[in-house]
Image (spheres, rainbow, N blue to C red):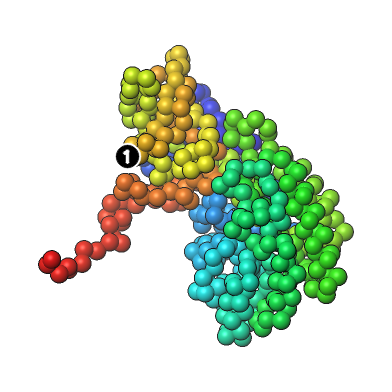
Amino acid sequence: MDHFAYVDGTLCAENVPLPEIARSVGTPFYVYSTATLRRHFDVFAEGFAGTDTLIAFAVKSLSNIAVLSLLGKRGAGADIVSGGELFRALKAGIPAERIVFSGVGKTEREIADALDAGIGQFNVEGEAELAVLSRVASEKGMTAPVSFRINPDVDAGTHDKISTGRKGDKFGVPRARTFDAYALAEKLPGIRVQGVAMHIGSQITSLAPFEAAARSAVELVGTLRGMGHDIRTLDLGGGLGIPYGRAAEPPPLPSDYAKLIRSVTDGTDIRVMLEPGRMIVGNAGLFVVSMLYAKDQETRTYAIVDGAMNDLIRPMLYGAHHEIMPVTEKDAAATNYDVAGPVCESTDLFARDVALQDPQPGDLLAFRTAGAYGAVSASQYNTRPLVPEVLVDGDRFHVIRRRPSYEDILSLETIPDLSDH
Ligand SMILES: *Cc1c(COP(=O)(O)O)cnc(C)c1O
């Protein structure tokens, strides 16, 4: 469900025709729908109504502060993985107690900043990190609220590059060392043990791995409590998949996911924490490009567009599929094009055999389901400025990240006075 639809043959974001945005900000750009963002968050939150739940939005999936602010106002917390994301979440007005710090490589500086901010939970991924957290917190005379991220050894059945909960993956504390880790944490100064955390991967399209992980987590909570640990929070991470248009199997509904989690955690007397990212923002965004040239390469015909792998890398990184739609519908026969960007890499190819109706230079094309892990992983490779982000709200739109000028880009660089050899 989203709020992008054709009106009189023109694709609109809510009530705004996309060509209007293109005229104003140029292409390529990302556009998000507030109505879709709100709806996705609310549907998910309603699934947990009446229970003690924190929905900590995974900031890394779409980290623009306008989006964080919108979700924060609806009650969302933030799952962060860096000091930069901490800074964003706080700037966006998300209360510190609703911030959870995940990630395998937290630096001392990031840990100190998060302690100073007073965040709600550190999801600690290993004993060495625990020792640093203990030392930094003690030096400050503070106590860090800690949950261990446990690697449950569950195969989420998703793409190898986004699977995180199997034995041997770099994430979490191995299941076999769990009890030793908790025992160690109880002994260290500056640490208060409060929870158990898991996150098994992303774009997971069946409920079974979630059920396996949640059951194993609930069992672990019981065992840890039996050993005298005061476990009050259970963080089940994110990872719920969304339809990308060509999925063989439609992913579970957020309401069914919520029902499953509730059925497994019911009666545990615990605060359940969830860290959805993709599920909230994926379908709330489009990536819009302009057609530059049709290029006949004898065995293949290319549509060269002005967006590239530096702007949207998911197809190149994960073989991800994004449906590509014309912004203005035409009455012409469709032929197949390989859609590629201008970057000087053969891998800068979005999709093969996309049926397009007589694409002409200047025609706009929209990539669906580009809200999650799109703009956030953009780079300036080939000195292509970061893509602007636009947020539509009814019949208005706001530029929430402007396109940097070439001057902006070079302002970070200097030419030093080098010795002459
Ligand atoms: C990436 C990540 C998430 C969000 O995953 P989605 O698939 O976008 O829901 C949640 N928690 C942690 C720890 C993550 O690394």
184 and 342: which is toward the camera: 184
As drawn, 314 above or below 336: below
Asked if residue 349 shows in the view, the reply is: yes
Q: Which residue is mark 1?
A: 344
7 and 83: which is toward the camera: 83
Q: Amino acid at mark 1?
A: Cys
Quadrant containing the N terminus is top right
Residue lying at the far left of the rendered structure: 420
- Image-quadrant location for residue 151: bottom right
x%, y% of residue 392?
51, 43
- Image-quadrant location for residue 125: bottom right
- The residue sitting at 61% across, 55% down in the picture is 169
As drawn, 68 above or below 179: above
- Image-quadrant location for residue 180: bottom right
Quadrant containing the C terminus is bottom left
x%, y% of residue 395?
52, 40
- The residue sitting at 61% across, 77% down in the picture is 131
Left or right, residue 143 beside residue 379? right
x%, y% of residue 385?
34, 48
95 and 335: which is toward the camera: 335
Asked if residue 77 shows in the view, the reply is: no
As drawn, 232 above or below 214: below
x%, y% of residue 234?
75, 62
- The residue sitting at 77% across, 50% down in the picture is 212
- The residue sitting at 79% across, 47% down in the picture is 260
Residue labelled 1 has its Cβ within 8 Å of some atom of ligand 1: no
Left or right, residue 141 beside residue 192? left
**SS at mark 1?**
loop
Specify few, some or many for label 1: CA neighbours under 10 Å numbering under 14, 14-19, or 20 or more: few
59 and 314: which is toward the camera: 314
